[in-house]
Each structure stands twice: as structure tokens, then as C-alpha cells.
Amino acid sequence: YHEKSYNIKITKEPYAPDGFKRDIYLVNGQFPGPLIECNKGDVLVINVENCLNEDTTIHSHGIFQRDSPWYDGVPGQTQGGIPSNETFTYKFKVDQSGTYWYHSHSRAQYIEGLLGPLIVHDPQDPYLHEYDEEIIVILQDWYHTDSKTLLATFLTPESEGNEPDPDNGLINGKNSYNCSWAPNGSKCDSDAPLANFKLVYGKRYRFRIINTSAFATFIFSIDDHPLDVIEVEGMMTKRHTVHRLPINIAQRYSVIVKADKPKKKYWMRSEMESACFAAPATNLNPLIKAIVEYEGCDNKDPSSTAWSDDVENCVDLNVTDLKPYKPQNVPKVDRKIEITINFKPDENNVTMGYINNSTYKIDIKNPTLYKVYDDVKTFDTDQNAFILEKDCEVIDIILKNEDGGEHPFHLHGHVFWLLGIGVNGTTLDYDKLNTKDPIQRDVTTVPAKGWAVLRFVADNPGVWGFHCHIEWHVQSGLVAQFVELPDKIKKLNPPEDWKALKSKIKEY
Ligand code: C2O
């Protein structure tokens, strides 16, 4: 196999993505972290040097980790953290292609900068000849207070479950900020530059859009330029044109954009759907902008106007509009697992997230995958572990959301066929689900008081996280895990340095 290696060094340093200076995590001194890319079929090697004074992990979001479940990067589930001042190597074969990202899965490190894009190219990509260049666009919300402080306030009885609101949003790590909103004494420069994307007239671009937020879902658009969706989270789709593209946390889309409009500057817009927040902040400009600039145009600011197409708030792009590029062969279901989501006060009166009435408590000292090797067969109820023992069993997860907010749910180790999504008031009729030509993805929105049905084949031995990707909800316990094919896991040979991490685990 062809090996592709990266060295990444993780530090925490003062940085001002939007002009507001604070300490954030950097990867090789950069934010967002550097691009990691390889071809389908390659072995990807990521050497991590942890220069923090806390432990860390790297999770390659969306990568299946087939036969390498110990490299999925989830503390409490698949590994002990990489200790401070130590190195660890993730090495895995990538037999898939598409738009992914890597991020820390430790505490809330990713929302403070520990993330970057991960792209897997496919030499056989059916659209390869339909675009000339690729452009990566990372959307995210951004906070001016460190996550530890925010969490300490959030996880108290007084917060009543109101999540911390972002102060700003970024495109490729950039935006400006109205510094008169910043607290007295902060280091803030109101003239921070916006991201600028240069296009050449006549060229066709594949924009790979990734939402790496803690909390916010966005509607992405480029004035005057239609977006042809061709990929959703690794699955190629038939071309589907939209003007405004909703994208929830951890979701990814590829769109083809033609640079065939008058040579000038246009706005790229990433509209934060703050209407989905429990308590939208006042000092927040929810319209995040960047500049799309044709080469050889004048220097004036963009004067373009936004698309006005209606998009439903706090719900995914209508996935029934997206059709797989290749015909799907969706197997029949063998086992249905119902998962109910809700929020309620725990014994300390702190509002927590519940999966089938159990709030997840991370067992940092005893990650599940080590337990499997130690032959532990039952798990504490607060580990929200679902055990899948039959090889190739076809699983339906029926997600029922009793909460009044939407939740972007992510399954590790797999893509799932998204058989249907229902908003508040629609009943789930199993016979009406789409088993003919559903798309596959790894994150779906479960609408407020709604439902979603996800089908996957249990054929990948490992411990796979299943959680809401809103970081505040990860911290409030909206997390489960699938212990998949434990007998097969035990036949795999985990590396020594991974085993060694177990003895180095420190409590948070
Ligand atoms: Cu983006 Cu549990 O992962």
C-alpha cells in the first residue's frame, strides 16, 4: 500500500481568528489545522505530538477504521488519551473517499481550534472531469470564552439547559468582530480580515463544505452562484442544484460551482441559524461572510445580493431530493433499536441529556475497547452500550426526539442509509420509509420533537460512538456506543503503544 504520513504538533497559544485574542489550540501553529489528504486505498499515518499540558486524542470523523478500531480516537470508548508531552501514531487503511475532518474527541478541545479537514480522493470519482479545482470551506461557530468556563456555567441548575451561545462564526478560521461588544480590557481588533476565495473566470470548482461547529447549524450560499450538490459525507449523489444549503454540525457536502458570472466580488454567506438556539444572544452577528473574488476584477467590496429561496429552519436539506449516484441495494432490517432522546434535571437539578432514560457518564479510566479485550461482557448502565453480536446483522436505529431542539446525531465506524426524517407532528410509518434509493451519510439531524430512521450493517468490529454532535450535549450526556462484534474484535491484534496508553490514563 501507499503510505501517506503527517506529523502534527498540538499546542495552545494566543490567537485572534476574528480579531479577538484568546488562547486556542493550534495544529502545527495553524488554525484551522492543516489539510490531511490521501487517496482511496492508501494507509494514512498521523503522528501526533502533544505539546499541551493535558491529554488529547485525534478522531478522524467519518473514517470507518475497519480492522483498526483502536485508532478511532474516542477517550472513554476506544483509547486512553495521548498524555501531555507524549507522541502517538494513528495508522489506518482508508478504503473510502470523500470529505471528512479530524478533530480532538477529548473534552471540548475541538471547539477551541483542534480540528482540520481530511480529504480522501478517489481516482475513479465520477465527477473528476467535471471540475477544475477544489476549495475547502470550513464553517464554524466561535466562542470568546474558554470551553471549561462555559461548561461550568452551562452544567448548573441555573442554566436550565440553555446552551452557551457563540460570540461569532468563522469561515476558514476568519471573520471580523464588533469589538465594542467585547468585555473591557480584552485584546480585540475590529479590522480582522474575512476569508477570501479567488476564482478564475471559466473554471469549475468543487467546494467541499464542512461544518465544524460546537452548536450552530448554518445555511451556506454564494451570491449569484448556484450550488450543484454532488457529494454528501463520502457518498456521491446525482447533481442537485440548490441556492441555499443548510448544513448541520459535522455534516459535509461537495458542491460544484461554475465561475461564469461577471468578473467581480461576491459574498459567500454562512447564516447561523440562531433561531434554533434555546436563547439567542443579542451581541451576535449571525451572518458570517467571506469574499469570493474573480481574478482580474476591481477592488471594490462585493455588492451582490443574497439568494432569497426559502429554507426550512433547523432541519436538514430535504434529503429525499438527493439521489445516490449509484443504485443502492438496501438490505432488509433484522433488528430495530429504539433510541429516545430527552432532557431533564438530574439528581443535582442540572439539566442533562438522556438516551433511553440514561445520561452517559464518561468512564475515562476504563475505555470500552480495552474492556472488550479484557473479556468484560456487561457494561454499566450509564455507559449506554448497545451490543451487536451477530455478524452482518442489519440494524435500524429509530431515533425519537422528545426534546424541543434539533440534534445532529453522528454514528462512528459507519455510514447509515437515512430511511426517513420526520418533523414534529409526523408519525413514523415504517412502510413509507425510503428503502429504494436513500442516501448514506454519517450525521443526520433529528428534528425537534421529530424522528429519524438510520439503517446500517453490523459488519465492522469495534466500539463505535453514537452521539449528538452539539458539543454541549456531548458534555451533558447525549452519548451512546455500539459494541460491535466483540468476538471479532478479539481476533484483531491491537498495537502495543495503544495498549500502553491504558496505564497512563489520568482523571480529567
Ligand atoms: Cu466528529 Cu464523535 O465525532
Image (cartoon, helix red, strand yellow):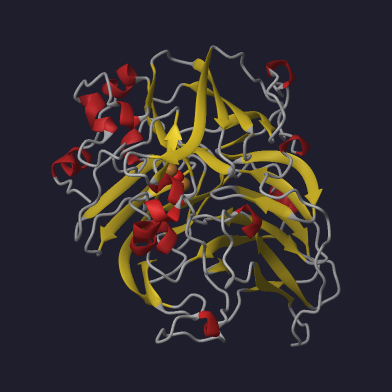
Res 2 seen here: no
Using residue 16 as the reference point, say whether residue 171 is left or right of it.
Answer: right
Which residue is at a point 31% across and 24% down the rendered structure image?
489
Find residue 270 and report its horizontal and vertical position in percent: 66, 63
Specify the quadrant of the image occupied by residue 378. Answer: top left
- Quadrant of residue 290 within the rendered picture: bottom right
Q: Looking at the picture, tell me which residue is in the foreground, 159 or 468.
A: 159
Does the image show residue 373? yes
Answer with left or right where residue 127 lies relative to residue 159: right
Front residue (pair 73, 432): 432
Residue at 41% in and 69% down: 145
Which residue is drawn at the image coordinates 42% and 29% (left, top)? Answer: 357
Is 48 on the left or on the right of 296, as rendered? left
338 to 33, vertically: above or below? above
Quadrant of the drawing holding the N terminus: top left
Q: At which x and y percent is residue 106?
A: 33, 51
Q: In the image, residue 437 lies at what x, y percent? A: 72, 27
**Identity of the residue drawn at 24% across and 42% down:** 364
- Residue placed farthest to the right in the image? 262
